[in-house]
Image (cartoon, coloured by chain):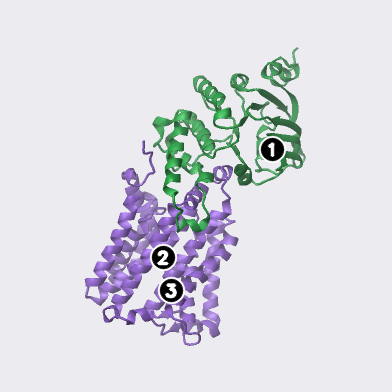
Amino acid sequence: MLEVKDLSKSFGGIHAVQNIDFTVPTGRIVSLIGPNGAGKTTCFNLITGFYQPSRGHVLWDGADVTASKPYDMAQRGVIRTFQKTNVLRGMSAFENVVHAHYLRDRTPLWRTFWREPGSRRVQAEIDESASTLLDLVGLGKRKDVGAGSLSCGELRLLEVAVALGAKPRLLMLDEPAAGLNTREAEELGGLLRRLPGEWVESLLLVEHNMHLVMQVSDHVVVMNFGKKLASGTPAQIQANEEVLEAYMGKAA
Amino acid sequence: MKFERNVMAGFLVVAFLLGAFLQSEYLLHILILVLLYTILAASLNLIVGYVGEFPLGHVAFFGLGAYSVAILSGPDIGWPMLVTIPLAAVIAAAAGWLIGRITLRLNGPFFVIVTLAFAEVLRLLAGNWIDLTNGPMGISGIGHPAILDWWPWLHGKRGFVMMGVVLTAFALFVTWRVVYSSAGRAAVTLRENNYVAQSIGIKPLRYSMFVFVVAAFLAGISGAYYATYISFVGPEVFAFPFTATMIIIVLLGGKGTLTGPILGAIIVTLLEEYLREFKEVRLSLFGLIVMAVVLFAPDGVMGYVRRRFPRFYKRTSHA
């Protein structure tokens, strides 16, 4: 579904991402892992158009979408979250998810003053979908709490609900488990496992929590210093010497 | 949402009844000022409250509306008011589009300064382009809409109150629709978090631009209303006092609330009249009020009401 070919990005002399290739097939969970500064988030920004790649291509359903604008990628069905928590702080959790339904809500500008027949039904539908999504991520009881008052872990879950509100085909989560405790991370893992097929077509993760990655992924891509180090199933990665070396250092 | 609609409708009904039964010319004049400032503040509030930027040059659109009516209805062109008032709003909106294209790419202090510069440029133009604007002398003897002559009851100030009620109703309807529309929600999403907005598919400039143009349109209407009521327009319509008044109204009433501009307009107009005997001290007092509001109630009076009674406002689940 998503195909990344020879993707590279340099900032001045720094090669943040070099010749990265991978694919995300329909119905799969693919994880991008690697030590800090390996270029994982840069990869996300390149795919979703927040950065322009220096070289290489991003293919979506076979069509070249390299360097499309972020809103353009979202309209094609690629929705991402951010490493640093980003929500609409001034609003309740429920309103956050309601606002995330923009693509469903969208009307021509002149319709602002002359409402479409059936716009009430669309609003009711959005309200219902927002409630369902909050229940799905386990924030059902915290619906009407201001986003500014939610805990760090709850904000992470709210971000997932906001992203799901945009009805992605490919959901890209940037460190969804950062700041979660062990139990919360476990629950998140269960949630992520349920997503493909029912809520999204596929999932691309950047994650540092190895336990979570190994538990949910179908395929893992390891990056180090901007380059692809290895890729394979979780079991293959766990047995890969180069990967162990990158993470743990060389055996004496 | 219902609460806000009822407040707005209630305000219009009260204004209509007061206009219909008040006999004092002075009170009718104050009522007209309240209506005028409501439109102007509702327009500024769209930008301050829903785009999240702070224009110091919003008066540019007000002045453009006023001058457009003065020139187009003046002896040289002589079009009827029923045509020139909407046209004045369209001219202001077109200027809004132009200025928005330049300024909405900026934010924070840059936006403030560039919008202020636009208003100043227009003020200098109005003062120096003698052929078009009659320079510092201004344009006097602007007529009133012919429709007010049809019925003796509408002669004089009462007619302007009724005209104000109609224009305010229109302005409040427009702001209400904008705020509770897909475009309004997109604008608020952008204001709250630009990155989230883009990542869920919102094209940034499109919505801030839309709200900006609508706001300019409404400011143009209020300018046109001002010109025909005062029957005189001079370069001072682009000057700072109007800017200061509308900012005070929006901050005091509550930015980002639909009913704030109404409440702010009533309070500020009455205060201005009440404090008139204090002459220059009046402005200092206003300064103190604004500082107090910014420090202690950053969301104004209606912002306080919204915090206190969230159920009047929040979109909550119906489950």
Depth check: give the residue in front, A193 or B234. A193
Residue at position x 48%, y 43% from top? A99
Q: Quadrant of residue B261?
A: bottom left
Q: Check the image and report above or below for A15 versus A246.
A: below
Residue at numbered disc 1: A61
Left of A166 or right of it: where is A67?
right
Judged from the image, the secondary structure of the residue bearing numbered disc 3 is: helix
Q: Check the image and report above or below for B61 versus A9.
A: below
Which mark's residue is nearer the viewer, 2 or 1?
Answer: 1
Depth check: give the residue in front, A141 or B25. A141
Question: How far apart, in angstroms, are the residues tagged by discs 3 and 1?
Answer: 54 Å
Residue at position x 50%, y 59% from top? A110
Residue B58 at x, y percent in the picture: 48, 65
Find residue B40 and name its label: 2
Dots 3 and 2 on the same chain: yes
Residue type beneath disc 1: Asp
Residue type beneath disc 3: Ala
Say which chain tag 1 marks. Answer: A
Q: Quadrant of residue B171?
A: bottom left
**Taking the image as drawn, is residue B219 in sight?**
yes
Determine the colour of chain B. purple
Residue type beneath disc 2: Leu
Residue B163 at x, y percent in the picture: 35, 72
Depth check: give the residue in front, B126 or B46. B46
Judged from the image, the secondary structure of the residue bearing numbered disc 1 is: loop
The quadrant of the rendering that contains the C terminus of chain A is top right
> Badge 3: few (under 14), some or many (20 or more) residues near its Cα, within 10 Å?
many
